[in-house]
Image (cartoon, helix red, strand yellow):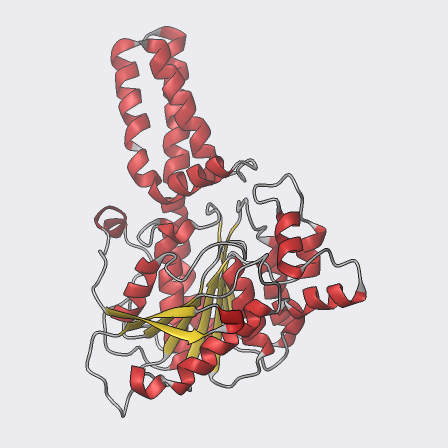
Amino acid sequence: MKWLILLLALACAAASLLTCLRAPDYMWVWKLAIAVGEFGHWFVLLPLGLAGLAALTSGGGCRAATLVCCAVAVAGLLRPSGSAWRLAETLPEKIHAAFGGADSGARPFSVRRLYGGEGQPQVAVTTEVFARPDGQELKLDYYAPPFAKDTTARPPCLVVVHGGGWDSGDRTQLAAWNYRWAAAGYAVAAVSYRLAPRAIWPAQRDDVLAAITWLKANASRLGFDPSRLVLLGRSAGGQLAAAVGYGAHDPAIRGVIALYAPHDMPFAWSVSREDDALNSVKLFRQYFGGAPDTPARRALYESASGQLLAGPGSPPTLLVHGVPDTLAWDRHSERLAARLQELGVPHYYLRLPWATHGFDFNPDGPGGQLAGYAIGEFLAAVLGPNPPGRRI
C-alpha cells in the first residue's frame, strides 16, 4: 500500500511540473498540461489526500519521500492560481496605461470563480451563410446581445476566428466564450474559413475578409454597428486575425486580439520541425502549398505575417500567450509586441508564466480569468464604453 501511495505521489509531482516546464512533444502531455494548469486548484486535493494517507500508513523513508512528492505536487498545482493572483494586482493599471479607457471595476481574478464558475448565459444564436467560394458554403454563427435593438446605440461586433492548425477546427470552437461576450453586450460573429490542404493561403484571408464584408452589409438586419469591429483569433485564428487586421487597412477594424499565435511566418517556418507535437513542417506546407524556397512562395509567407504587415496606423492589439506553450512558441507574441512597440502601436502583451496552448479552454481557470478580464477592458477601451450587459 505504501509503495502505491508513493507511486501516485510521484505521478502527481511529475504532472505538476507541467505548470513550470514546456511539455514534451506528445499531444496527450499537452492536454494534461491544460488540465493541471487550469484545473490544478481541484486536482490539488489528490496529493493532499495522499499525504494524509502516507502519514497514517507509511513510515521512515517511504513516508518522507511521499510527503516530499506531495509537497512538490501541491506547489506546482497551485502555482497557476498564485501567479494569477499576483498578475491581477497590476493588470488593471497596465491595461489602462496601454489603451486608456475607464476602469470597469471588474476583478481580474477571483478565487471564488475557480470553484464556482460563472456558468453559460443564454443568448440567441443564428447560423448564416456568408460566402460560397468554389461551391463551398462558408457559415458564421451570430450571437446577439440579449437586449432589444436600439438604432441609436447599436453594439459593436467581435469577429472570432477559430484555430486548428489551418487544417481543422470550425466556428463552434470554445463557444462558451462567445456566449459570455454576447451576454456582456457585444455582438459576436464566429466565422468558418476554408481549410488546408484543400485551400491554401490566401484563401483563408479572403474568407475572413468576405465575412467582414457580409457582416457590414447585414449589420442593420442583425442589429450591430458596422463601424466598430474587433478581430479575435486563437492559434491559427490569431495569425489570421492579425494578418487581416493589419493588412486590410479598414477603419472599421478598431482592434486585434491574438491568443497564442504565430505572426512572422518565415520565422515560424525556420523554427518548425517534423517531430514536434503538430508536425509543423507539414502544416506550413499544407497552408502555403510548400516551403518558402522560391521568391513567390516566400512572398506568400510574408503576406500572411502580421508582424511584417504591421504599420504605424495598425489597430491597437492585445496579445496573450503562455510561456511553456508546447504548440506555439511564446517568442512569436514577444517578437510582435516588440515590433508594435517600435511602430508606436498601442498594445499589451499578457504573458502567463504557467499557461500552455489552449489554456482558455476553462474560462474560469487562472488563465481564463485573466484573459477574459484583459479582453473585456481592451474591448471597452477601443470600442467605447461597455454596452449594456454583464461583465465578462
In-front residue for pair 295/233: 295
Would you say residue 100 is visible in this rendering? no
The quarter holding residue 11 reads top left
- Judge whether 76 appears above or below 317 on screen: above
Residue at the (48%, 49%) spot, across then down: 357
Would you say residue 191 is visible in this rendering? yes
Please identify the residue farthest to the front as the structure is shown.
135
- Judge whether 321 appears above or below 301 on screen: above
- Judge whether 122 appears above or below 76 on screen: below
Left or right, residue 185 beside residue 161: left
Q: Residue 295: percent from the left, percent from the top?
A: 80, 66
Q: Residue 276: percent from the left, percent from the top?
A: 61, 41
Position of the C terminus, as image quadrant, is: bottom left
The quarter holding residue 93 reads bottom left
Please identify the residue farthest to the right as the structure is shown.
294
Q: Residue 179: percent from the left, percent from the top?
A: 28, 64
Q: Residue 12: percent from the left, percent from the top?
A: 39, 27
Position of the N terminus, as image quadrant, is: top left
In-front residue for pair 317/137: 137
Residue at the (35%, 77%) spot, across then down: 102
Please identify the residue farthest to the top as the structure is shown.
60
Left or right, residue 102 beside residue 211: left
The quarter holding residue 263 reads bottom right
Please identify the residue farthest to the bottom as the structure is shown.
152
